[in-house]
């Protein structure tokens, strides 16, 4: 079976390619490298000792997408390609709508032409807005508070409409909670070029002394220690869920949404303390103002993914902290000279 992975050299995509290859799937990647590097293709091969086909290009480029489908008999697609910085999406919303929604439309049009109607889509827990209750279940009301979140919500709607129009489609909407960690080889992981927006990449850059101090955004939330609580999930666990979702879309039709989290919430302080302990490294921090738009707490009820996909997260917070740091140390040592 051959799977097309859009955004396959990115953070979650690269880990998913590894799991797909290790489960016996053939993998074709298309990525325009706007937020990743070509070397990732070699790292995927090095980890798996398998071949990967790579196309550098944009999913919005219809002719390129047709060429890929002509050259390969694609059985299903995992659509990771997209822009993901919430703050940036507020500043340049049209870029987000064109890229994140345009890519989905072009991709699905070409899939239709080639009669490939099986797709796994990268959605986000952000589609739950500010949940009234915890843990979050898939049936909770959906809303968005920024353009990035709206692209996820609209894409979910577009893919659902597509299924309603043609019941031969098979769609899995995967709502990720907070992916962190890296492949234990230390070869692939998350490595933002700019100053990171998200917590774990920031912690890592403070630990490696690339940044001075972590700012913790608020300690007066309604949580165990006042800092924000999130459902952090190891990226390798997340990647394995995609293999299960691919099996599901290959074998069935329909549209379904799944929460991908551990079900366990950790505060910012708990994450920082665990990181310092397992890696034996200092992470200096200061408490600053809340970040606008942040919510107190967010964690999944992952029961449905367990029941329907036979998937659950197995890696704990210590492993997540260790693997994130291990990747950074390995990456920095390779790119120093
Ligand atoms: P990433 O930026 O590391 O990966 C996305 C990849 O897509 C990059 O390699 C980028 O170069 C590529 N890309 C972007 N637009 C493209 C286009 N038009 N054509 C071809 N390639 C394109 O991000 P990630 O963390 O791996 O996220 C993958 C997906 O999961 C995204 O859709 C993101 O919104 C979603 N998601 C991520 C998180 C998270 O915390 N990382 C949480 C929820 C949802
Ligand atoms: C953010 C996005 C969300 C996106 C997700 C994954 C916002 C408002 N939300 O979620 O839409 O799906 O990333 O990409 O941007 N924190 C600090 N200091 C920091 C960074 C973060 O204290 O320097 C805190 C935050 O206040 C939060 C927690 O750490 O309580 C996690 O933050 P982050 O990693 O940015 O993820 P989310 O805000 O959950």
Image: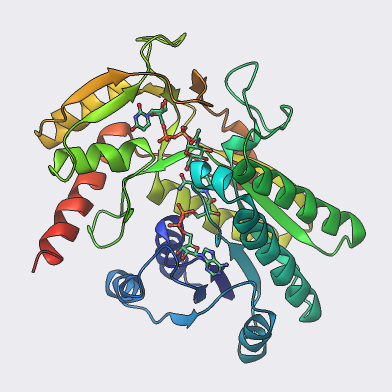
How many marks the image carries: the answer is 0
Q: State the residue lying farthest toward the right.
A: 165
What's the image's color scheme? rainbow
Q: Residue at x 14, y 28 (%)?
A: 277
Q: Residue at x 47, y 8 (%)?
A: 222
Q: State the residue lying farthest toward the front.
A: 91
Return the x and y of residue 154 as percentages of the image width and height: 74, 48
Return the x and y of residue 223 as percentages of the image width and height: 43, 11
Relative placement, left or right, of 315 versus 4 is left
Which quarter of the rendered image does ligand 2 occupy? top left
The one of 237 and 310 positioned closer to us in this rendering: 237
Q: Residue at x 46, y 81 (%)?
A: 54
Q: Quadrant of residue 322?
A: top left
The one of 7 and 70 positioned closer to us in this rendering: 7
The image shows residue 37, relative to residue 98, as above or below, that is below
The image shows residue 8, relative to residue 280, as above or below, that is below
The one of 46 and 175 positioned closer to us in this rendering: 175
Residue 104 seen in render: yes
Position of the C terminus, as image quadrant, is bottom left
Residue 322 seen in render: no
Return the x and y of residue 13 as percentages of the image width and height: 46, 61
Relative placement, left or right, of 309 versus 163 is left
Q: State the residue lying farthest toward the bottom.
A: 71
Position of the N terminus, as image quadrant, is bottom right
Return the x and y of residue 290 as percentages of the image width and height: 42, 20
The image shows residue 124, relative to residue 7, as above or below, that is above
Relative placement, left or right, of 206 versus 26 is left
């Amino acid at each position: 079976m051959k799977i097309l992975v859009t955004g396959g050299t990115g953070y979650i995509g690269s880990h998913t390619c590894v799991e797909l290859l290790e489960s016996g799937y053939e993998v074709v990647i298309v990525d325009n490298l706007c937020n990743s590097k070509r070397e990732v293709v070699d790292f995927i091969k090095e980890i798996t000792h398998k071949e990967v086909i790579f196309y550098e290009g944009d999913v919005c480029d219809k002719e390129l997408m047709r060429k890929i489908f002509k050259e390969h008999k694609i059985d299903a697609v995992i659509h990771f390609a997209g822009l993901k910085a919430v703050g940036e999406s507020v500043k340049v919303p049209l870029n987000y709508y064109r890229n994140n929604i345009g890519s989905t439309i072009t991709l699905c049009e070409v899939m239709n032409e080639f009669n490939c109607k099986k797709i796994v889509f990268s959605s986000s827990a952000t589609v739950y807005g500010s949940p009234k209750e915890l843990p979050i279940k898939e049936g909770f009301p959906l809303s968005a508070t920024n353009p990035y979140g709206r692209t996820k919500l609209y894409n979910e709607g577009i893919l659902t409409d597509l299924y309603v129009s043609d019941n031969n489609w098979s769609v899995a909407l995967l709502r990720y909670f907070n992916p962190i960690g890296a492949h234990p080889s230390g070869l692939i992981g998350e490595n933002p070029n700019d100053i990171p927006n998200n917590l774990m990449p920031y912690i890592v850059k403070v630990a490696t002394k690339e940044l001075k101090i972590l700012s913790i955004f608020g300690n007066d939330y309604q949580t165990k220690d006042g800092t924000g609580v999130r459902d952090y999930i190891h990226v390798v666990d997340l990647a394995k869920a995609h293999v299960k979702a691919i099996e599901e879309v290959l074998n069935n039709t329909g549209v379904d949404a799944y929460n991908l989290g551990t079900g366990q919430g950790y505060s910012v302080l708990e994450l920082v303390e665990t990181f310092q302990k397992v890696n034996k490294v200092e992470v200096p921090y200061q408490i600053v103002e809340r970040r606008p738009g942040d919510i107190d707490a967010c964690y999944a009820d992952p029961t449905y993914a367990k029941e329907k996909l036979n998937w659950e997260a197995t890696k704990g917070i210590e492993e997540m902290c260790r693997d994130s740091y291990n990747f950074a140390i390995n990456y920095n040592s390779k790119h120093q000279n």
